[in-house]
Image (tube, rainbow, N blue to C red):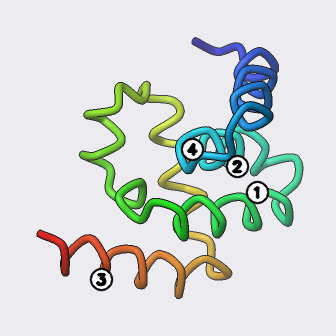
């Protein structure tokens, strides 16, 4: 809800408890405009842990808000994530 700093703190807190895909990708999306290199590293780790997060509809089912969704879509279009996104999509297509 337009409080990126709070979102970052909450994602970091969640990651400190357990390094799951959802907070990793959420944090990556929040920091992408300020630290693209770290955002890409976090996104790669998130997609490797749970490829389903590459899918917009899946994230929507997980109750991701519009702004976070939009920022994630921008992040996932980064050329450095192209192979990771393709691999994640292929993994979710195999399992469906």
Q: Residue at x 34, y 32 (%)?
A: 62
**Cα gap from disc 3 to disc 2, whole angstroms:** 22 Å
Labels 4 and 2: the sequence-earlier one: 2
Compute the Cα span from label 4 to label 1.
11 Å
The N terminus - image quarter: top right
Residue 29, by quadrant, is top right
The answer for how far apart the CA atoms under marks 4 and 3 are is 22 Å
- In the image, farthest residue toward the front: 17
- Which mark's residue is nearer the viewer, 3 or 2? 3
| Closer to the eye: label 4 or 1 | 1
Contact, mark 3 vs mark 2 (Cβ under 8 Å): no
- In the image shown, does 48 or 70 lie closer to the viewer? 48
- The residue mark sitting in front, 4 or 2, is 2
Residue sticking out furthest to the left: 96
Q: Which residue is tagged 3? A: 90
Q: CA distance from mark 4 to mark 2?
A: 9 Å
Q: Earlier in the sequence, mark 4 or mark 3?
A: 4
In the rendered structure, find residue 64 and report the number of the disc placed on it: none
Q: Secondary structure at mark 1?
A: helix
Residue highlighted by disc 4: 71
C-alpha span from label 1 to label 2? 4 Å
Q: Residue at x 41, y 60 (%)?
A: 54
The numbered disc on residue 28 is 2
């Amino acid at each position: 809800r337009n409080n990126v700093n709070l979102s970052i703190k909450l994602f970091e807190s969640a990651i400190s408890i357990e390094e799951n895909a959802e907070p990793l990708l959420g944090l990556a999306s929040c920091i992408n405009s300020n630290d693209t290199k770290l955002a890409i590293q976090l996104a790669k780790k998130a997609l490797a842990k749970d490829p389903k997060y590459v899918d917009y509809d899946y994230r929507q089912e997980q109750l991701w808000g519009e702004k976070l969704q939009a920022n994630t879509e921008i992040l996932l279009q980064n050329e450095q994530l192209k192979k990771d996104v393709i691999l994640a999509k292929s993994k979710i297509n195999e399992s469906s």
